[in-house]
Image (tube, coloured by chain):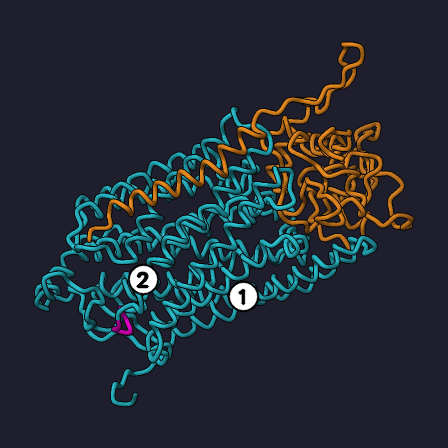
Chain colours: A cyan, B orange
Amino acid sequence: MTAAAPVHTFVPPIAHPGGPAPAYRLHLERAKIDSSTRGPVIFFLTSAVLWLLASTFLTCIASIQLHAPEFLADIPWLTYGRVVPASNNALLFGWASQAGIGVGLWLLSRLCRVEVKYGGVLMIAGLFWNIGLTFGALEILGGKSSGVEWMELPGGAAGIMFLGYAMVALWAAVLFGFRRQGPAYISVWYLLASFLWLPWIFGIGYLTNRSAGLQGVMHNVVAAWASQSFLSIWITGVGLAAAYYLIPKVINKPVHSYNLASVGFWSWLVFAALTGAIRLSGGPVPAWLVTFSIAAQILLLVQIVTVTANLVLTMRGQYHMVYHSPTIRFTFFGAISFSVASVLSLLGSLRSVDKVLHFTEATTAMQQCVVYAFFSMVMFGAIYYIMPRLVGCEWLSSSMISLHFWGAAYGGGMVIVLLFLGGLAYGMSLGDPEALFSQIVQIGYYIHVGRTLGLVLVVIGHLIFTLHFLLMLLRIGQPGGEPTLFAPLDEEAH
Amino acid sequence: MDRSLPLFAGVIGSFALSAFTLVIVPKAQIGALQPQTTLDEGKITDIYPIENAGMIKGREVYAANGCIYCHSQQVRDVQNGTDIERGWGERRTVARDYLFEQPPFLGSVRLGPDLANVGSPKWRNEPEGETLKPKKRDRAWHLLHLYAPRTVITESNMPPYRYLFEERKISGQRSADALDVLPRGGAGYEVVPKNEAKALVAYLLSLDRSHPLQEVK
């Protein structure tokens, strides 16, 4: 076996029609598939990791400015109102989307057992995406933001990104079309839905918001729908696809129940797609629209329960893997965060709760719970799993992975909990009309100081992760063969 | 069993259903509103809202500097919050209020007060009778507040927007726009607003959505 060939010691969880293929043929096939995805997947993942770092630093600047308004105040392009959208776009389109594309493409080619043809096109697609986003982020910092939240990127930049993504979506559909695996695995369902939804929400959202034909608050209706779909379909779909693949794969046990998975998927596809108006609650839009989305959010409970049950039951008896496998530690943390984030979103959507939390940073906390605590943690887990198979060596240091985890989990967790509880206190004070606004603002001061401290931990985690990732690209790691574990896996001991 | 057909149909169907209910139906309902007109003996005596082309520059400054990340521009009714009791507006805002805005700056976080009616003389951000309330929030007040928020509101956490102003040597007469602050250069200098600051304050002072509407009881 060559150094580049990925090594697999796990039995695939998917039943093969016609009996299992001989082990050596599977190895060979996977090696071929991995070598066909190597270029594009590494390209997307590397860009994602660098954008994550940029976004983390920008978020830190914004957080400091909230408790020290004079910080960098004389630099126009680093004023709070420009740093926030720049960091958010870097996080959503730079990190989350590109990690999602990279991991998604790798999963699709593995699960469909198809080699990627003309991978160069995907590299060009990635180049388009990054060039568009870089211009867009610089334009936001330069004061060219569109003024629509979650759609701040100027039209030209978004257009270039859209062209890039269109190629990715086409390639994903082709991979699925040529699949050799008979019945598609759960992850493939989620990936297909996510990859096909994204261009439409992205395209329709941006096109209509830039056209003169859209009147007044319809801008906000479309933006709310597109941004909510971005979170609940694109981000969530890819995150769950990766979790459904990684957990059974690493613990070497099939998914607990296909029926549960099926119920979860279909309820998600129908109900998550209808939750788009929740963030307009209480706003100047027809009341039925918000009520309709709240109803969909409540019905989404079916998915929350089935997915949680399925992943937890799959993990049952294998919880010790959290101590051994970096992939499992990150992915299972993400899976649990998915359930927490979903329950919070459900409770937060109820009118009596929304009334208190609506204009507070508790909403930011709930979004970060989805984007960071769930999705990003699963993506970290996936990257720790995928990179050794593409690069041909194992991660250099388990302590670095461990530090990354604790920085991300403690720091990120601290930020989310502080913003949520702080938002709750803030919202309750706003609910008292006798409370002086300038006094309420003081509640924010302590929340933001704490948030900055939490972000320092996140920065440390991300710096270590980036360094580790770059070392991996240079093939500075442990020789291929045995995965880097936190603690040696001794089968006899358990 | 090959699930690919139901899968594709499901994905496309869910998208169609979502776009139909959350975009197309609302567009049919509120996507082509007209201003409210009051007729008196066949003559139009009152139109609201009116398109205000002069405010486009100020809106651009508002968008460029991300005011929306701390300030909303929407008043909720009494069942949904204390906006009206706080003095941010006399009635809730509805779709018709934003008819000519491309796009409306509804905002989603209130690290600062709501600005839907900040140009109205009745707007307040302090409980009724509170002595801290500024006598008036006029052009000079807004300019000073933008330049150095903490000189007018001690606890403010708004960043200063000094880059929207310039400090220059007084040549002859002191400028009428000059702020009532001590310039860093000392005496002999003055702080005057750039065009962006002037446009932004003009826009802020134009914000008044208190005109009665038939759909708001």
Marks 2 and 1, Cα distance to the nearest angstrom? Answer: 43 Å
Residue at left offset 62%, top offset 25% = B33
Q: Residue at x 64, y 36 (%)?
A: B62
For image coordinates 74% across by 54% down, the residue present is A430
Decide if residue A449 is on the left or right side of residue A247. right
Relative to A74, is B200 above or below? above
Tell me the residue at 62%/29% (across/down).
Answer: B101
Q: Is residue B193 in view?
A: no
The segment highlighted magenta reads: A249-253
The residue indicated by pointer 1 is A456
Lower position in the chain sequence, tag 2 or tag 1: 2
Mark 2 Cα shell of 10 Å, populated few (<14), some (14-19), many (≥20): few
Q: What's the residue type where badge 1 is placed?
A: Val
Q: Quadrant of residue B145?
A: top right
Q: Secondary structure at mark 1?
A: helix
The nearer-to-camera label among 2 and 1 is: 2
Q: Which residue is mark 2?
A: A259
- Which chain does the numbered disc 2 sit on? A
Give the SS element for disc 2: helix
